[in-house]
Image (cartoon, grey):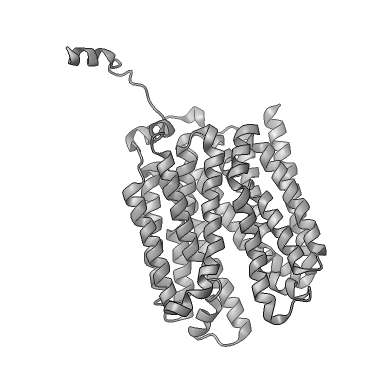
Amino acid sequence: MNQQAASSLMPPAGHAPMLSYTERNAPYWRRNLFVCVIGSFSTLLSLSMLLPFLPLYVQQLGVSTPSAVVQWSGVAFGATFFGTAITAPLWGRLADRYGRKPMLVRAAVGMAVVMSLIGLAHNLTELVALRLLAGLIGGYASASIVMVGTQVPRERSGWALGVLSTGALAGNLVGPLVGGFLPTWVGIRGTFFVGGAIIAVAALLTILVVREDFDRTTDVKKGSDAGAASPSTMNRAVILVLLLTAMMVLLANMSIEPIITVYIGQLGVPDDHVARMAGIVMAASAFGSMLTAPRLGALADRIGTPKVIIGCLVATGVMLVPQAFVTEWWHLAILRGLMGMTLAGLLPSIAKEVRHAVSDHNSGKTLGYLQSAQFSGQVIGPLIGGQIGAHVSLRAVFFVTACLLLVCAGLNRWVNTDAAS
C-alpha cells in the first residue's frame, strides 16, 4: 500500500522535472561558500606572504646588483598572475564539463605542491618557472568564484560573492604581515613549506566538506542543446564591457603599487620609515574593501548590479584625484582606505552580472574569462604605472587611472541604457 502511494506521487516516466545545476545544489551552497572563503584566504595568504622577503630570496639565488634584484623580484611576483590569466578560461571551461569541485581540488593540491617546491629552488630560473607554474595550475580563488557564482541563488549572489571577496582580500592583507616575521622563525625557505602546508589544509577541507551535485550527462547535454540560450548581441556587448571594467579596476588599484614607496619618500618621510609607511598605505585599500564588500554586494542584490557598478566606478575615480595632491603619508593612507571601500563593490557585482548574462553551461568559461581579465589588470597596472611615473610624473598616474575608471562608468551606463530600451 505504501509502495502504491509512493508510486502514485512520482511523475510519469519521461516527465521528471529537470532541475538546474543551481537548484540541485541549493542545499550545499552555504557550506561550500564557507569552505571557499577559508580556502581563498589560505591560498592568497600563502601567495602574498613572500612580498616582504622576495628580494632577499632573489639575492640568495645569486642576484647581487640592486637594480637586478628589483627587476627580477617584479618578474617573479608577476609570473603567478600572468600564468593565472592564461589558464583561467581553460579551467572555467573544464568546470562546465566536469564540475566545479574537481577544479577546486586541482587548484589547492597543485598550489600546495608548487609552493613547497619554491622553497627548494636552486636558481632564479627555477624560482620564476615555479611561480609561473603556480599561476598556471593554481587559481583557487578563481575556481571559488565559479562555484559560488553558479550555486548561490540569484537573489543572494551579490552578497555571497562579496563575502567571498572579503576572504580573498583578508588573505592579501594578512599575508605580507605574516611574511614580515615568519622567516625569522623558520627561515626564508621554511616559509614556503609553511605556505604549502596551509594550502594543503585548505585542500583537505575542500575534499572532505565541499559537496556538489554535478550530472555530467544532464548538464553537458543541456548545454549542447541550449542553442536558444546563447547570449544575444546585446549580452555580448554587456559582457565585453564588464570584462574591460574588471581589468581596469585591477589596473587602477595596482598602477600605484610599484611607485608607492617612491611617492611616500617624496612626501618627506624619513628613509628608515618609508618601507613601513608604504606597507600601511598598501594595506589600507584592502582593509577598506573588507569593510564594505559584503554590504555593497547585498546592496547590488536590492537595487540592481548595474547601479552599484556605475556608482562605485564614479566614486573610485573621484577618490583617485585627491591622492595626487596629498602632502602627508597618512593623507594617502586615508584616501586609499576610502578608495578600497568603493572598489569593494565592483568585482563581486561584476562577477554577478557576468554570471547572469550567460546560460548555465557557459558560466564557468565566462567567469574564467573574467578572472583572466582581472589578472591581466594586475599584470598591466604596475607596468603602466611605472612607465607613467618614470616618463611623466608620479601624480599623473592618479589622473590617468581616474579617467580610465570614469570612461568605464560611461560605457557601463551606455550598454545598460541600450539593454533597457
Where is residue 187 shown, x and y percent of the image?
44, 79
Pick the front one: 370 or 148 = 148
315 in relation to 253, above or below: above
Residue 22 seen in render: yes
Figure quadrant of the C terminus: top right
* Residue closest to the eye, 46 or 402: 46
Q: How many labels does the image show?
A: 0
Image height check: is 86 above or below 151?
below
Whether residue 47 sits left or right of residue 336 in the image: it is: left
Q: In front here: 180 or 368? A: 180
Q: Where is residue 300 in the image (x, y as percent from the top left)?
A: 62, 37
Residue at 37% across, 25% down: 18
Question: Up-down: is 233 above or below 146?
Answer: above
Q: Where is residue 195 in the image (x, y as percent from the top left)?
A: 42, 67
Q: Residue furthest left?
A: 1
Work out which quarter of the rendered image holds the N terminus and state it: top left
Residue 65 lies in what quarter of the image? bottom right
Quarter of the image for residue 375 reads: bottom right
Could you tell me residue 409's position as x and y percent?
73, 44
On screen, residue 25 above or below 196: above
Q: Can residue 236 be seen in the rendering of this structure?
A: no
Residue at screen point 48% across, 57% down: 41
Residue at image x 47%, y 62%?
Answer: 135
Which is more toward the observer, 393 or 198? 198
The image quarter in which residue 328 lies: bottom right
